[in-house]
Amino acid sequence: MPDSLRLRDQTDADADAVRALVTAAYRGLPHASGTEPAIMEALWRSGAAAVALLAEDSSGLVGQAAFSAVEIFGPGTRPNGKAPAGGWFGLGPLSVRPDRQRQGVGTALIRAGFARLEARGASGCIVVGDPAYYGRHGFRRAANLHVPGIPDRYVMAVLFGDAPPPTGTVEFHEAFSASEG
């Protein structure tokens, strides 16, 4: 972790600063939907952000990461009412202020988030994103893991402990349907 970086839990008082950070971090990115700030706000307001971490340095807020529970439904389990696989979380949004990217802020947030999830007994973490970036953090393509509407190559998982690899369809919290509207 960079020397001057401090990590802490997000609070209600951080809402405006987090919105500004997430907006700046995703502005102009080809893969951004523009809804990332609304997603983060909806995760926070709903209480679905099981882990919400902020990174600060002497210049202020430089990064944020949210982890929320996901459900994984095996083949045929959703329609007949069987329970989803439990203990899985999704990473996102992960935001780093543009002038602090590639300086270890995202790495520090991910590692701290993983430690929090493992302490809760989580099975693992799922992310939808760039395999080159997230692969550096231990995420790997999990065979037979799918997110509707997303090419499988962008769906990756990190297993904690001796958790078995996840199999099925991932359903993120409804906050991921939030829009700016």
Image: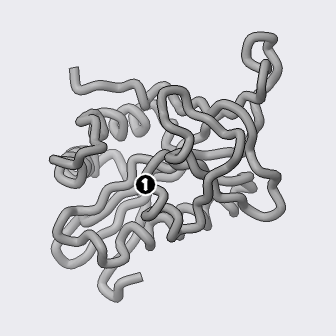
- Secondary structure of the residue carrying numbered label 1: loop
Residue 127, given in percent of the width and then of the height, sits at 52, 49
According to the image, label 1 marks what residue? Answer: 130
Q: Could you tell me which quadrant the C terminus lies in?
A: top left
- Vertical relation: 33 (above or below) 140: above
Does residue 114 appear left or right of residue 78 in this picture?
left
Q: How many marks?
A: 1
Residue at the extreme top of the image, as rendered: 80
Residue in view at x 44 percent, y 50 percent: 129
Q: Quadrant of the N terminus?
A: bottom left
Residue drawn at x 16%, y 47% as measured from the top left: 28
Residue at the image position 61 percent from the left and 58 percent from the top? 140
Could you tell whether 113 is left or right of 37 in the image? right
The residue nearer to you, when weighing 106 against 68, is 106
Residue 134: x %, y % from top left: 48, 61
Q: Is residue 88 visible?
A: yes
Q: Amino acid at mark 1?
A: Asp
- Is residue 50 shown to the viewer in this render? no
What percent of the width, then of the height, locates residue 31? 30, 44
How many residues crowd around disc 1 within 10 Å: few (fewer than 14), some, or many (20 or more)? few
Picture coordinates of residue 95, whole percent (x, y): 32, 56
Residue placed furthest toward the bottom = 3
On screen, residue 163 above or below 7: above
Relative to the observer, which residue lies in front, 50 or 135?
A: 135
Q: Nearer the viewer, residue 9 or 101?
A: 101
Horizontally, is 151 left or right of 28 in the view?
right
- Please indicate whether residue 128 sits to the left or right of residue 70 in the image: left
- Specify the quadrant of the image occupied by residue 180: top left
Q: Is residue 117 placed above or below 154 in the rendered structure? A: below
Q: Name the residue rendered at 36%, 35% in the picture.
A: 39
Judge by depth and name the residue closer to the eye, 47 or 181. Answer: 181
